[in-house]
Image (spheres, rainbow, N blue to C red):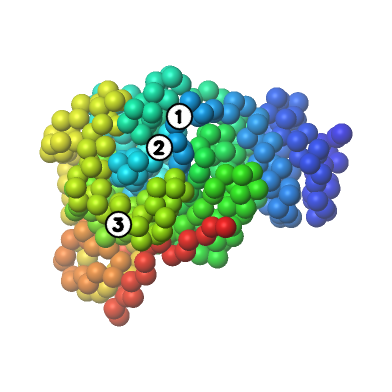
């Protein structure tokens, strides 16, 4: 088989056979197929697409390009969730403890933040002492004992995606539903959980700009998961403003704590409650959406979700006095109010701009080598739908840097104000399942 024939076949709009797809994935992973041929094929896929069978084969070949995680030593149904990447997305920190408090098993591998999106691991490490590297045995024992562990990726899972995603990033080939779906699903399937809930974001700052595109990506991923016998479901959530109020590492941890104490922002509480209910149904703990939602609400009200957060952090070595007394977290030297320059109603808050601004204030990484300032970020005071008067505070910028005036302006400009009242939409727009 020759790679050039495979590229030409896809370039001309033909279907690739399973053998051709597997030849590409194994050859690219081991290095016998060079980057220039892989990028040509990726570009052909961007333009020509792939059918369901091709996407399922690509996903399966990528999943098995390296180690796969065996979670069979953990008793019960192992649930997992994945977000396609949001701004202010601290969901795992609240949702994980809540579903675990209700009896689900969450053996989760998370990632670090890059660019405008944050990563759960960085947020967890804003609590001193937190250890995100457990051995397989420690990981399994912890989930068996307390129902939850969140760690960094172990071993070499899906090396094909590691190489291909880095290549796509610099060749203009990220934007393709077959490539995004196979990239995400190969990693989720290799991580070994029994069920997967996908939180597919749409809007500015998300991979998918429109609800329609997000729906197509979600359906594609749900079909892949189901065809490979994992209970896979998806929700489509609105990223036309950041999630909740806080963006930035320890700021988001504090918001997750507030949420577990029953004082979370409305959109975040809605997302956690709906997603939690679906995960409890997948774990066969709740029978209906209503029952699942009631269980999550109860775990917030009776404090069991917060106690589970403490157990999780304690088990992984963190100093939980920070969670019990969040005022102990370091606070930025400069907390700068960003003021509205006219009256209006907030119609949209550009998540991409807010995410990038938070990064520039020190709260994120431009490259993987950058160090994060855990206290830096942005705390929104106004959200979509809110009425704003000229001179009122839209948001606070938190930073230890000087000379950030242009960033403050960017935060200001991320707010779109309309003269007319703005209709509020629910954050969870659709639920997709078999
Ligand atoms: N996230 C991934 O893991 N892969 C993609 O291709 C896009 C988003």
Q: Mark 2 points at which residue?
A: 105
| Frontmost residue, 326 versus 99 | 99
Q: At 18% from the left edge and 39% from the top edge, which residue is drawn?
A: 332
**Above or below for 233 versus 257:** below
Q: Which mark is residue 74?
A: 1
| Frontmost residue, 65 versus 231 | 231
Picture quarter with the N terminus? top right
Other-residue count near label 1 (Cα within 10 Å), few / some / many at <14 / 14–19 / ≥20: many
Please identify the residue farthest to the bottom as the structure is shown. 420
- Residues at marks 3 and 2, CA–CA distance in whole angstroms: 19 Å
- Residues at marks 1 and 3, CA–CA distance in whole angstroms: 26 Å
Q: Mark 3 points at which residue?
A: 294
| Frontmost residue, 105 versus 63 | 105
Q: At 22% from the left edge and 38% from the top edge, which residue is drawn?
A: 307
User: SS class of the residue under badge 2?
Assistant: strand
User: SS class of the residue under badge 1?
Assistant: loop
């Amino acid at each position: 088989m020759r790679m050039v024939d495979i590229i030409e076949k896809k370039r001309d709009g033909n279907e690739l056979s399973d053998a051709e797809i597997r030849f590409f994935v194994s050859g690219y992973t081991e290095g016998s197929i060079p980057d220039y041929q892989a990028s040509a094929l990726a570009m052909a896929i961007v333009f020509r697409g792939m059918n369901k069978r091709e996407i399922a084969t690509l996903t399966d070949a990528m999943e098995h390009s390296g180690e796969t995680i065996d979670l069979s030593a953990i008793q019960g149904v192992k649930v997992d969730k994945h977000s396609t990447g949001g701004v202010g997305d601290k969901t795992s920190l609240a949702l994980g403890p809540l579903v675990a408090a209700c009896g689900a098993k969450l053996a989760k591998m998370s990632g670090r933040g890059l660019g405008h999106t944050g990563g759960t691991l960085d947020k967890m490490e804003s609590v001193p002492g937190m250890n995100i590297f457990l051995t397989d045995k420690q990981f399994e024992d912890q989930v068996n004992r307390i129902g939850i562990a969140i760690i960094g990726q172990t071993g070499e899972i899906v090396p094909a995606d590691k190489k291909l995603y880095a290549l796509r990033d610099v060749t203009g080939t990220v934007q393709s539903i077959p490539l995004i779906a196979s990239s995400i699903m190969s990693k989720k399937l290799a991580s070994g959980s029994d069920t997967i809930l996908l939180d597919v974001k749409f809007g500015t700052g998300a991979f998918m700009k429109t609800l329609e595109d997000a729906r197509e990506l979600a359906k594609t991923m749900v079909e892949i998961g189901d065809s490979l016998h994992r209970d896979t479901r998806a929700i489509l959530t609105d990223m036309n403003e950041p999630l909740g109020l806080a963006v930035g590492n320890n700021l988001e941890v504090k918001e997750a704590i507030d949420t577990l104490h029953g004082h979370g922002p409305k959109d975040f509480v809605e997302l956690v409650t709906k997603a939690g209910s679906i995960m409890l149904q997948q774990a066969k703990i709740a029978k209906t959406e209503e029952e699942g939602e009631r269980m999550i609400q109860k775990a917030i009200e009776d404090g069991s979700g917060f106690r589970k957060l403490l157990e999780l952090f304690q088990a992984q070595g963190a100093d939980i006095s920070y969670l019990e007394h969040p005022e102990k977290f370091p606070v930025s030297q400069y907390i700068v109010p960003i003021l509205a320059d006219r009256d209006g109603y907030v119609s949209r808050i550009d998540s991409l701009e807010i995410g990038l601004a938070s990064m520039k204030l020190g709260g994120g990484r431009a490259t993987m080598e950058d160090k994060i300032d855990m206290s830096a970020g942005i705390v929104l005071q106004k959200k979509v739908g809110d009425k704003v008067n000229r001179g009122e505070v839209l948001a606070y910028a938190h930073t230890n840097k000087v000379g950030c005036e242009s960033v403050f302006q960017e935060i200001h400009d991320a707010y779109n104000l309309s003269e007319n009242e703005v209709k509020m939409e629910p954050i969870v727009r659709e639920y997709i399942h078999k």
